[in-house]
């Protein structure tokens, strides 16, 4: 071979080595994922999420996950939509499952069906409790993956039950029993001032969600599946609101006016209320802070049992590269595996979102020692979708305003719900064309 040929071969080999090295370097450059997370959900959640992100990165060194704690759910979606408009949205986020229509209307997210295409991926998407998928799917597509999900449950103080002559192991099973028990549990001093309420159902923060407990039990839905209609003024809805109002204004077993969402668990710990309705997401909080024996039960039945589901879903954002979308999917699959879903449920009190998580040894052991943990799972068979429509925040606000007007006696339940329905119809009209 001539010197010239040798030089050419050497040059080609060097070029191949260099370009190969560039390709290799590019392949090794980590995929970076920004992950918006709503931190205002109680407990040491940030430490848990940070730990999960670090564990994932150890197993997947080619992917960097950066959690950004963005405040309440409401604050988080505002930050997400602002980032979207500025051209720098996160790659994934946990947002309220009810934000699904808003995120679709903003063209912000991709359906998981576009990223999760393998047979294994499709089986994974079918592995979650059907009740949690009601707020995750529309139009034949899956837009969200359940993560920190919940239902509303009843907590009761067993010591207070004993003092009132009630069976401490038997919670109220019906609307009538709820009133009867609450009457016996409401304590007044010599001056007639209440020292312990029978029941507290919060009406700030998420009044529509607590109200869905009453409407579900009265066998009526608040919206259609397409998110284009609401039924706030149906007679059964007005009847459910009348029952809620009567707990304070007629039966006097609950404080009048607005009951704060955030302080209701504290009121329970301090024995200011003997029973409360709140999220299963408070289960670990109650377990750690109640200095008395307590019980957890499904909500009392009206015409039927029932609760709306609640909580947050994972979403993948459209303004991500294909590599980022694939990496986001990998992380979401990893964090929602049976073992991790079980541990997340144990650590936080949220419902482990897939049936096989409840078959893991760690969850079986936990439930054996703390049977209350399984109540929310068992209630899922009676659960309905949480209120979710197009322009969801405004449509929900119309209902919240009506509920608070009725609970503060500013309007009758009938007038409050008729006004709320009129406003919701006005907002939703463009989506029904």
Image: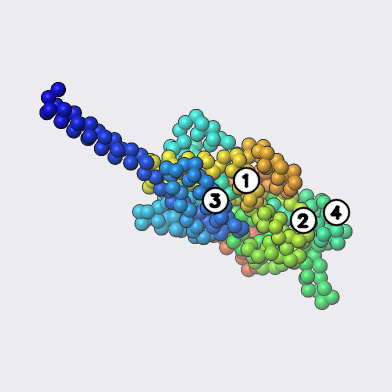
User: Mark 4 — residue?
Assistant: 167
- The residue positioned 63% from the left and 51% from the top of the image is 347
Kindly report which numbered mark, 1 or 4, lies closer to the viewer in this rendering.
1
**Mark positioned earlier in the residue sequence (1 or 4):** 4
User: Mark 1 — residue?
Assistant: 343
Circle 4: element type: loop
Q: How far apart are the alpha carbons under marks 4 and 3?
A: 42 Å
- The residue positioned 71% from the left and 60% from the top of the image is 289
Residues at circles 1 and 3 in contact by the CB criterion of under 8 Å: no
Circle 2: element type: strand
**Mark positioned earlier in the residue sequence (4 or 3):** 3
x then y, percent, for residue 420: 56, 59
Q: In which quarter of the image is residue 85?
A: bottom left
Q: In which quarter of the image is residue 20?
A: top left
Q: Nearer the viewer, residue 422 or 113?
A: 113
Kindly report which numbered mark, 1 or 3, lies closer to the viewer in this rendering.
3
**Mark positioned earlier in the residue sequence (2 or 3):** 3
Q: Nearer the viewer, residue 261 or 68?
A: 68
Kindly report which numbered mark, 2 or 3, lies closer to the viewer in this rendering.
3
Circle 3: is it few (<14), some (14-19), or many (20+) Cα within 10 Å?
few
User: Mark 2 — residue?
Assistant: 294
Q: How far apart are the alpha carbons under marks 2 and 4?
A: 12 Å
**Mark positioned earlier in the residue sequence (1 or 3):** 3
Kindly report which numbered mark, 4 or 3, lies closer to the viewer in this rendering.
3
User: Mark 3 — residue?
Assistant: 51
**Mark positioned earlier in the residue sequence (2 or 4):** 4
Circle 3: element type: helix
x then y, percent, for residue 110: 43, 43
- The residue positioned 51% from the left and 31% from the top of the image is 120
């Amino acid at each position: 071979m001539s010197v010239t040929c040798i030089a050419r071969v050497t040059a080609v080999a060097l070029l191949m080595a260099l370009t190969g090295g560039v390709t290799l370097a590019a392949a090794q450059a980590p995929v970076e994922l920004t992950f918006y997370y709503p931190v205002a959900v109680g407990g040491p959640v940030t430490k848990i999420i940070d730990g999960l992100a670090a564990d994932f990165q150890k197993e997947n060194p080619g992917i960097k996950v950066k959690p950004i704690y963005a405040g309440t759910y409401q604050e988080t979606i505002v930050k997400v939509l602002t980032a979207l408009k500025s051209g720098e949205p996160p790659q994934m986020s946990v947002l309220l499952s009810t934000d699904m229509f808003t995120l679709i209307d903003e063209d912000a997210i991709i359906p998981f069906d576009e990223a999760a295409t393998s047979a294994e991926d499709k089986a994974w998407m079918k592995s979650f409790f059907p009740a949690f998928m009601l707020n995750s799917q529309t139009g034949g597509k899956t837009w969200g993956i359940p993560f920190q999900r919940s239902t509303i449950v009843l907590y009761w103080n067993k010591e207070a039950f004993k003092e009132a002559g009630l069976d401490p192991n038997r919670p109220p099973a019906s609307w009538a029993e709820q009133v009867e028990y609450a009457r016996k549990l409401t304590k007044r001093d010599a001056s007639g001032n209440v020292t312990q309420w029978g029941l507290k159902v919060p009406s700030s923060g998420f009044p529509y969600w607590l109200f869905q407990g009453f409407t579900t039990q009265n066998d009526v839905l608040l919206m259609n599946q397409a998110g284009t209609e609401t039924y706030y003024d149906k007679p059964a809805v007005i009847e459910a609101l009348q029952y809620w109002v009567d707990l304070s204004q007629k039966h006097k077993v609950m404080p009048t006016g607005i009951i704060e969402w955030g302080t209701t668990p504290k009121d329970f710990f301090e024995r200011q209320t003997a029973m409360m309705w709140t999220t299963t997401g408070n289960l670990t909080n109650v377990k750690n802070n109640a200095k008395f024996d307590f019980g957890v039960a499904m909500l009392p039945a009206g015409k039927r049992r029932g609760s709306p589901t609640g909580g947050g879903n994972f979403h993948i954002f459209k303004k991500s590269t294909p590599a980022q979308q694939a990496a986001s999917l990998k992380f979401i699959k990893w964090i929602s595996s049976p073992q991790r879903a079980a541990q997340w449920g144990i650590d936080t009190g949220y419902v482990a979102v897939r049936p096989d998580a409840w078959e893991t040894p760690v969850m079986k052991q936990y439930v054996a020692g703390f049977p209350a943990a399984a109540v929310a799972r068992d209630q899922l068979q009676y659960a309905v979708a949480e209120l979710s429509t197009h322009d969801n925040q405004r449509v929900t606000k119309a209902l919240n305003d009506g509920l608070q007007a009725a609970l503060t006696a500013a309007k009758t339940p009938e007038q409050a719900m008729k006004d709320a329905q009129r406003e919701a119809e006005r907002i939703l009209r463009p989506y029904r064309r």
